Image: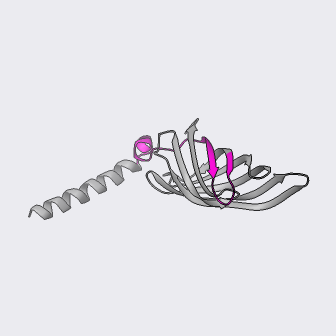
């Protein structure tokens, strides 16, 4: 009987929460949002040390903010200075999000060199909190760790 009561209460609370979150005026409490803007500092480790920074703008989000599309401009130094404009996506619920980007890498040396670029990684960011921690693999960073913060309209 005790188990049945616990199961009933769990189901009732889940149904109540789903109904409660359907109301658009309460949506912010049910699905808190990520910030629209962010700035991150990236540190790449392999095979060369790479230091860069990027500005990211979130231009689209699903209603529950479980899927987000971003555009990013990244600038840094690999063995030459570079600029790396990308389009990316991050998706997930809660603190952990998977992140995927793609773009072009423009190396500025004696000649300008253009390569495809991209990354696959994880993004840790509590919704409604500005701190961002990222890590993953990609071009040009290879293996990277990134720290940053979000700001602006949500």
Residue 27: x and y in percent read: 43, 44
Q: Residue at x 63, y 48 (%)?
A: 42
Q: Is residue 41 magenta?
A: yes
Q: How many marks?
A: 0
Q: Residue at x 55, y 41 (%)?
A: 35
- Direction from residue 60 to residue 114 in the image, left or right: right
Q: Residue at the top extreme?
A: 152
Report if residue 99 is visible in the image.
no
Give the quarter of the figure containing the N terminus: bottom left
- Direction from residue 148 to residue 4 in the image, left or right: left
Residue 4: x and y in percent read: 14, 64
Give the residues drawn in magenta, as a range: 23-52
Q: Residue at x 40, y 46 (%)?
A: 30
Q: Nearer the viewer, residue 141 or 14?
A: 141
Report if residue 144 is visible in the image.
yes
Q: Nearer the viewer, residue 15 or 138?
A: 138
Q: Residue at x 17, y 59 (%)?
A: 6
Q: Is residue 77 magenta?
A: no
Give the quarter of the figure containing the C terminus: top right
Residue 15: x and y in percent read: 30, 56
């Amino acid at each position: 009987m005790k188990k049945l009561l616990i199961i009933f209460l769990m189901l009732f609370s889940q149904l109540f929460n789903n109904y409660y979150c359907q109301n658009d005026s309460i949506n912010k409490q049910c699905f808190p949002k990520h910030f629209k803007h962010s700035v991150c500092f990236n540190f790449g480790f392999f095979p060369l040390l790479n230091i860069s920074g990027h500005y990211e703008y979130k231009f689209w989000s699903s209603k529950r903010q479980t899927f987000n599309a971003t555009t990013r401009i990244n600038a840094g130094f690999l063995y030459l200075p570079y600029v790396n404009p990308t389009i990316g996506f991050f998706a997930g619920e809660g603190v952990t999000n998977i992140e995927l980007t793609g773009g072009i890498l423009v190396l500025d040396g004696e000649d300008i060199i253009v390569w495809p670029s991209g990354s696959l990684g994880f993004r840790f960011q509590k919704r409604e909190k500005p701190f961002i921690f990222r890590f993953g693999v990609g071009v040009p960073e290879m293996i990277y760790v990134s720290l940053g913060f979000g700001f602006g309209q949500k």
